[in-house]
Image (tube, helix red, strand yellow):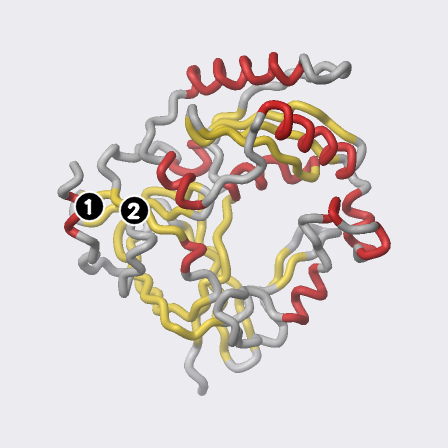
Amino acid sequence: MENIIKILSGYGFNSAGPHFIIDEINGKLVKRNHVNIIGHTFTIKPSSLKFCIGRYDLRTSDSFPCPHVNPMTNKKESICYDCFTFNSFNPSFYNVSVSELSIKQREYNMLPHNVYLALFDEHHIKVGISQKKRNLTRWLEQGARVATVIFECNNAYLAREIEEKISKELKLSEALRNDQKRQCLKNKSDFNKASTILEGLITKINALFEQQIIHQSFTKLDEYYLQNNVIQANILDISNEMPESISGKGIGLIGDTLVFENSHQQFMFSLKKIIGQQILFENKLTSQAFSPTQISLF
């Protein structure tokens, strides 16, 4: 019997809370598992081996393991050519002609899309677009703390037009780097203050358009990430240290950032750093290595 290989193929959120997506490979058979994070004690030890993380169906919004269990020789890539072709999705669709897009993406782009504002802290707010049914999923994937829909559009092209104008006129970001997002996590999330900031921004956006924003409620997202847990001000980011293992008790997941505790110290680690890698995953606690210089900063 062949040894079962475990691959960290992603992460996600559902009614039970945030979870790891772990593919178990036994020969050519693949079983996909969701492992809850909050309250779970774990040790993850990544190896240098990397595999395709699978494919996504634009029509059904379902994701699947790679049917070919393809190894990835290019360590910068996470999806094999076959799965990339199956996905047939170009996030920069507005920079190419329609004829260059797949039929699936042409259909997808004609579905209702929304323009939204996502706040990460009071100094970091972005404007973005998402397919209407994916609003919450998109916000959670990015790790926003508070978000709201500002325009409902008939298709992706109109949504992109509005997004681009807001970004250009108000100097509002369309994307934030992962390290910026992690830095934002050290700032306490104040929902009332965030709502006031977003309301002020909406007033400025309304001045740009004849069509006024249909104001919807602001969505507080921390409960999806942390449930009742709280991030400490002295949390340590070990994402760039790439420790031999990540070990602790799960506190939550904000975007791709895993938040956990070990020996009364909170840590955060970007799961994107090890997505697709073969891992040893154990339900046990070991000591967590980190740079002592981080502690000296407090």
Q: Is residue 81 left or right of residue 236?
A: right
Which residue is depicted at the point 19% across and 53% down? 291
Q: Which mark is residue 294?
A: 1
* Snapshot quadrant of residue 294: top left
> Residue 8: x percent and y percent?
45, 63
Can you give x and y, in whole percent of width and height, for residue 16 in the image?
A: 46, 43
Q: Position of residue 260 (x, y in %)?
A: 30, 47
- Kind of residue sitting beneath label 1: Gln
Residue in view at x 43 percent, y 75 percent: 49
Front position in the image: 260 or 285: 260
Q: Camera-side residue: 284 or 68? A: 68
Instruction: Tell me the number on the disc at residue 120.
Output: none
Q: Nearer the viewer, residue 246 or 21?
A: 246
Q: Earlier in the sequence, mark 1 or mark 2?
A: 2
Distance CA(mark 1)–CA(mark 2)? 8 Å
Mark 1 falls on what kind of element? helix
Q: Is residue 226 left or right of residue 293?
A: right
Q: Which residue is mark 2?
A: 237
- Vertical position of residue 212 compared to residue 110: above or below: above
* Label 2 element class: strand
Q: Residues within 10 Å of mark 1 (few under 14, many from 20)?
A: few
Residue found at x 61% / y 70%: 80
Q: Residue at x 57, y 76 (%)?
A: 70
Tell me: residue 238, above or below residue 228: below
Q: Residue 115: x and y, percent? A: 67, 30
Residue 5, quarter of picture:
bottom left
Amino acid of disc 2 = Asp
Q: Quadrant of residue 232?
A: top left
Most extreme residue toward the bottom is 1
Q: Is residue 112 above or below residue 42?
A: above
Q: Mark 1–mark 2 contact, CB under 8 Å?
A: yes
User: Which part of the image, by quadrant, shows the C terminus?
Assistant: top left
